[in-house]
Image (tube, rainbow, N blue to C red):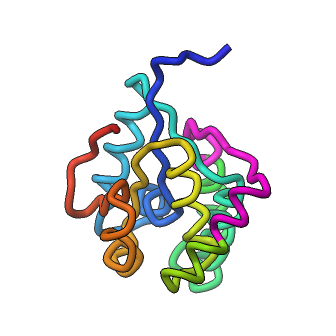
Amino acid sequence: MEDDTKQFLTLDASVVLASLLPNEKYAQLSRVLLEQAAIKPVQIIVPSLLDLEVTNAIRSAVLSKRINAKSGTETLKVYWDIPLKRMELNRVDVERSLTISIRYSCSVYDAIYVALAQRQNCRFYTLDTMLYHKLKSFFPFIVLLSEEKPAYK
């Protein structure tokens, strides 16, 4: 049985990758958010597709020689240690993400994070400045991590 007093937050691949890859501008902010969530009664919830997004970004970092293959493998191992609750997507989530993506001109991948945060009534942290500015007026629970200190709900 889950603790009903637990708060939730969601975050996208931009935040996770900033904490994992070298020379990221907001690495410290991302790490602080992840560390605070690990010690407070906060559960980080993410759509299950985050695993693929992160893995693909690590692959891209290896192919572009930003990191070597061994570092890529180690980075993925570190990722698996981040305490994330992966949420399976249901039909309502996917349909909602389609509606959001069409209405607000963003990708379905980005919209699924919005739909998940909306469903769970929690904040959604991102480092994607364009996404934030495009959606902030319509979804006030979106937080641009580079502009705000992490705060829960």
Which quadrant, please, contains the C terminus?
top left
In the image, 8: left or right of 83? left
Write the residue at 58% across / 78% down.
101
Write the residue at 35% across / 72% down.
132
Q: Which residue is nearer to you in this view: 71 or 139?
A: 139
Write the residue at 38% across / 24% down.
40
Locate residue 65, reporting x and y percent: 56, 82
Q: Is residue 22 above or below residue 82?
A: below
Locate residue 66, reporting x and y percent: 51, 78
Q: Which residue is nearer to you in this view: 50 or 64?
A: 50
Q: Which residues are magenta?
A: 78-97
Q: Is residue 36 above or below residue 11?
A: above
Locate residue 29, reporting x and y percent: 29, 53
In the image, 72: left or right of 44? right
Which quadrant, please, contains the N terminus?
top right
Locate residue 49, reporting x and y percent: 70, 60
Write the residue at 64% across / 55% down.
76
**Res 68 visible:** no
**Res 10 visible:** yes
Q: Which residue is nearer to you in this view: 31 or 106?
A: 106
Q: Is residue 153 magenta?
A: no
